[in-house]
Image (cartoon, rainbow, N blue to C red):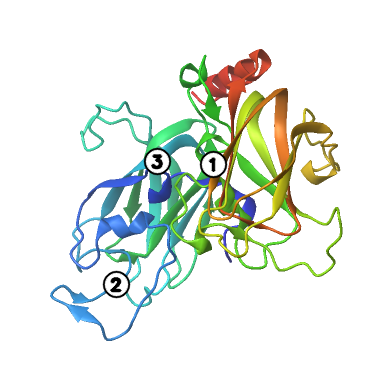
Amino acid sequence: MTVERDAGLDLACRAVGGSVVAASDESFGFKERLIDPTEPNFTPGTFDLRGEVVDGWETRRHAPAGDWVIIRLGVAGRLRTIDVDTRFFTGNHPTGAALYGATLGLADDPCDPGVPWRQLVAPTPLKADGHNPITVDDHRRYTHLKLVIASDGGVARLRAYGDPVPDPVLWSGVTVEVSGIEQGGRLEHCSDTFYSDARALIAADRPHNMGAGWEARRRRDIGPDTHDAVTISFLTPTDLHRVEIDTSYFVFNASRAVSVRGTRDRPTPGRPWWALPFDEVVLPRTGLLPDARQVFAVDVPGITAIRVQAYPDGGIARIRALGRPTEAGMDELRARWDAAQ
């Protein structure tokens, strides 16, 4: 069983600023590997001074009590699913785990004995060498997680999937990258993901090679209006002021042109994002340069999502939409914040 694609953003991942701040023990495997964005790997028979090299956090044998690790989330938010991933830990995985959450200020010490940890997941058995997705039923916003394993052992990755809950104060009166995954932007639909996952388009970092973007298969049915497309939703209605289309590292396979259309609508049961009318022109069809960041000034009010149409096919590294929440959007942010306290 694997975690579903729609489980939300991994709030703990190092790619969005997560950090492993403390652990009771890391004799065989470094705690920092828990939140590495890459998939775990293992090469049998590879040893260093600590023993066989593992790609994860592993504690010494015969712990007198359950070991623990504390993670500061890169993006504070509401959790939906925790995946305690024990891949490649076969005879040395923990027997079980419990999870706790806390909401702390920047200057607070998460190792202080007085931290008010709340139990998010009761002690749960873990299986070896696989995903262990666990549902979290708690509406509150958290900044830190504490994983307590029932025994000594090793965990390859900890994924904390959920939804960002930004502080409305930080959005008031400023321009925000509303498409960004850290700000609650979501990749809702994509016409083709043959070569890579289109969610890379709204990643927090800058692309570092061609594999860090979105590339569709080559279209052979090329006509005047042939295109691939992606739909990106925003956390709240926004007055858009700028759109960036970044084709970095796409030298010979970048999209030749794009158009960006917006909607003021939102999905309802039986009417998903891809079925909504995107009839607001945010950016008319515009030619692109390969291997370049291209920024366009726009002025379109009250947009809830954009559809980027790539002609004739997709080869784009990043898409960024920037703007300011509408008054109604700010009210939504405040309501979301209050509900998560």
Asked whether disc 2 touches disc 3, contact meaning CB atoms under 8 Å apart, the reply is no
Image location of residue 246, percent across then percent down: 56, 47
Can you tell which mark lies on residue 40? none
Can you tell which mark lies on residue 181? 1
Label 2: how many Cα within 10 Å (few below 14, some 14–19, many 20+): many
Look at the image and tell me whether residue 136 can be seen. no
Precedes in sequence: disc 1 or disc 3: 3
Can you tell which mark lies on residue 54? 2
Q: Which residue is mark 3?
A: 74
* Distance Cα–Cα, label 2 vs label 1: 30 Å
* Distance Cα–Cα, label 1 vs label 3: 12 Å
Image location of residue 68, percent across then percent down: 28, 51
Q: Is residue 304 rendered to the left or right of residue 178? A: right
Q: Tag 3's secondary structure?
A: strand
Q: Tag 2's secondary structure?
A: loop
Number of the front mark, 1 or 3: 1
Q: Residue at x 44, y 73 (%)?
A: 129
Q: Amino acid at mark 3?
A: Gly
Look at the image and tell me whether residue 173 can be seen. yes
Q: Quadrant of residue 95?
A: bottom left
Q: Quadrant of residue 128?
A: bottom left
